[in-house]
Amino acid sequence: MTIRTGRAALIAAAAIASLSVGTSLYAHGNVTPQAVDTSDLPDMAGGNDNWVQHNPYRGNARALEIGQSAYGQNCARCHGLDAISGGIAPDLRYLELGDAGDEWFVERFRHGSSHDGKVYMPPFGDVLGQKAGWAIRTWVESKHTDE
Ligand code: HEC
């Protein structure tokens, strides 16, 4: 079964809107991003501000570790422990593998998601940076399932 953007996102949006934790929760600082130490990871060939579209760390064991911890600190409260969603945000285990999944992942990671003036997912690109983003993607992809 594949629950992805469409219905799951609508349910998530409705759940979040009804609890009104969108903008207000972010504004109150409950979702302050936690810095990620990425000094062990190779820098981006084109510079860290030049975002690439495909994961340069796929298969990198250190990126997997850093990504797991960064996910736990920054994403799990909405997307669920161990990437298993409790229903308020899409289940990231169903993101496509490989390049197609990378492109969608980095779009959301960088820009988040807002509709009608409410923040459903805050943007992480500027605060955590590209290296942390791809480390998280490396870990998320390791949790992929088709079931
Ligand atoms: C405040 C809650 C919240 C936090 C924190 C959060 N997200 Fe999200 N995320 C959402 C919601 C809600 C959506 C669905 C948005 C939509 O469809 O408009 C989403 C969507 C996504 C998507 C697209 C999924 C799909 O199937 O379309 C990705 C990828 C994603 N988030 C990654 C992350 C990562 C990585 C982090 C941590 C760095 C993170 N999110 C932190 C709430 C959150």
Image (cartoon, rainbow, N blue to C red):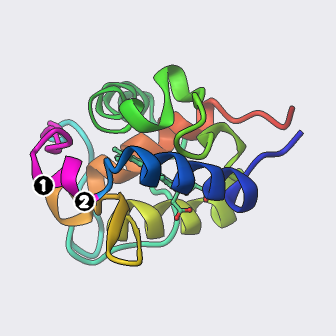
Residue at screen point 77% across, 33% down: 145
- Residue 57 in sight from this viewpoint: no
Residue at screen point 17% across, 44% down: 33
Q: Main secondary structure of the magenta part?
A: loop
Decide if residue 15 is on the left or right side of residue 75.
right
Residue at screen point 39% across, 43% down: 19
Which residue, given by chain and number where applicable, does mark 2 sit on? 23
Q: Amino acid at mark 2?
A: Thr
88 versus 27 height, above or below: above
Which residue, given by chain and number where applicable, does mark 1 sit on? 27
In the image, residue 61 lies at what x, y percent?
44, 28
SS class, disc 1: helix
In the image, residue 51 lies at what x, y percent?
34, 74
Q: Is mark 2 within 8 Å of ligand 1?
A: no
Q: Amino acid at mark 1?
A: Ala
Decide if residue 17 is on the left or right side of residue 147.
left
129 versus 28 height, above or below: below
Q: Residues within 10 Å of mark 1 (few under 14, many from 20)?
A: few
Give the magenta-colored segment's residue range: 23-37
16 versus 45 height, above or below: above
Q: Which quarter of the figure has residue 136?
A: top left
Mark 2 and 1 residues: CB-CB less than 8 Å, in contact?
yes
In the image, residue 38 lies at what x, y percent?
19, 41
SS class, disc 2: helix
Q: Looking at this rendering, what residue extends furthest in the front direction?
A: 18
Decide if residue 102 is on the left or right side of residue 68.
right
Q: In the rendered view of the protein, which quadrant contains the N terminus?
A: top right
